Amino acid sequence: MSSAPIYSIRMHATTGGDHLCGAERLSTSETLDGIAASLVRRALSHPRGSADALRLSVDRVEPEKVLRGRLLDVTTCAVADWRGGRNAARAFLVKAGVAAGAIDAAMTDLAAGAAPGGKNMRGAMLVDARSGLRLEPDPARGVRASRMDLSSEAEQRLRAELSPRNLDNPHVREAIVLAAKVAAAPGIVAELCWSDDPDYTAGYICTPLHGYLRFPHLKPAGEAIGGRAFFLQPQCDVAETIAFLEEAVVLFDEIGVFHPDRN
Ligand code: PML
């Protein structure tokens, strides 16, 4: 994808006016229509319902604006249930420099639905890692990490690592790519995420210290509320962080190391 024109494709789907799902890809002109069709199919067959409105945005990106990056190292942390998962995630986030009160505030908001009215946000909460205060300009929309993808070679290598671990699914692949962009953003201390898909209980944290640390259980099965919190350094330039997350175009062409599971 180096010299050919590159397009950023973004999809956002709603049902009843509420966020349903979104996705981001980078593509050459040859694969653009196939990717667009797959994103439309995804919006129409989401586990939380079928989209009644969806927006596809396609923007051409100047090749020299595309940054290159490496994915984070990946570790799965075995936990018995979602309570164990949240306790373990909390302990790792504290080690990474997030205040316990900020973690608890973010977990409470994520579990209740972080958007007004207890709904899922389209993007992530921004949370001050010391005070726990919410910093995103629009608490219904949040901040969406966008305009990132894997090179096709890196995708093949990632899938070859994930497949024998029974992890080669879109949740894991896309989360690993998104977390790498978040971790590369200025001002970020850590990320916390669990899925809003009722059939998918896993979640992860990412920090510079731990890489991508996944927990098979971070919320109860059947629960359709989830999302992301990005913990920010106190007094960082929030506008700069948002600009990187939403606008910088990053193609990951190297994968991280897969570590053995930890208990
Ligand atoms: C999502 O797809 O909604 C987020 C998934 C987070 C966990 C991915 C993983 O299993 O590592």
Image (cartoon, grey):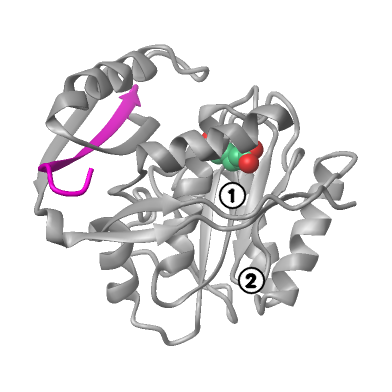
Q: Amino acid at mark 2?
A: Ala
Q: Amino acid at mark 1?
A: Cys
Disc number placed over residue 193 in the picture, else none: 1
User: Sequence order check: which comes first, mark 1 or mark 2?
Assistant: 2
Does the magenta-highlighted stretch encompass residue 148? no
Residue 155 is situated, as x and y percent measured from the top left of the image, at: 45, 37
47 shown above or below 4: above
220 shown above or below 99: above
Q: Residue at x 62, y 57 (%)?
A: 73
Q: Residue at x 74, y 53 (%)?
A: 259
Q: Nearer the viewer, residue 214 or 100?
A: 214
- Helix, strand or loop at mark 2: helix
Q: Nearer the viewer, residue 13 or 169?
A: 169
The answer to whether any part of residue 118 appears in the image is no
Would you name the residue on which mark 2 appears? 102
Mark 1 or 2: the one toward you: 1
Label 1 beta carbon within 8 A of ligand 1: yes
Q: Spatial distance from mark 1 to mark 2, Cα to Cα?
A: 14 Å
**Label 2 CA crowd tier, 10 Å (few <14, some 14–19, many 20+):** many
What residue range appears in magenta? 1-17
Residue 166 is situated, as x and y percent measured from the top left of the image, at: 70, 26
